[in-house]
Amino acid sequence: MAGTLIPRGKQQATIADLTDNSGGTADSTVAAVSGSGADATINNNFADLTAKINALIAALEEYGIVAR
């Protein structure tokens, strides 16, 4: 059945959320960075990746795949 989660083993250990101290702003885009002096863009890229990884962790926790 599409969209149905079928458990296949025991729940995995806790995965801690990442803490975003980049000072960037997440906007769902990892932007290209060229040259130097692009600190804000680089920080925004880290913020984007942190937000997405934390969303994936939350989804895994919601379905009981990993523990909180």
Image (tube, grey):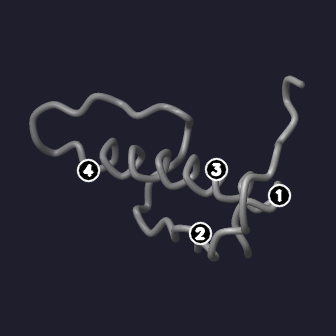
- Report the disc number at residue 62: 1
Camera-side residue of 6 and 39: 6
Please tell me whether mark 4 sits on a helix, a strand or a loop: helix
Identity of the amino acid at label 3? Answer: Leu
The tag earlier along the polypeptide, 3 or 2, is 2
Kind of residue sitting beneath label 4? Asp
Q: Which mark is residue 39?
A: 4
First in sequence, mark 3 or 1: give its number.
3
Q: Nearer the viewer, mark 4 or mark 2?
A: 2
**Relative to 19, residue 48 above or below:** above
What residue does disc 3 label? 56
Kind of residue sitting beneath label 1: Glu
**What whole-number distance in Å separates the C-alpha atoms at marks 3 and 2?**
10 Å
Look at discs 4 and 3 and give the one toward the viewer. Answer: 3
Of labels 4 and 3, earlier in sequence is 4
Mark found first going from the N terminus, 1 or 4: 4
- The residue wearing badge 2 is 17
Bin the neighbour count of mark 3 within 10 Å (Cα to Cα): few under 14, some 14-19, many 20 and up: few
Could you tell me which residue is drawn at 11 percent across and 42 percent down?
36
Local crowd at mark 1 within 10 Å, few (<14), some, or many (≥20)?
A: few
Q: Amino acid at mark 2?
A: Asp
- The residues bearing labels 1 and 4 have C-alpha atoms spaced at a distance of 35 Å
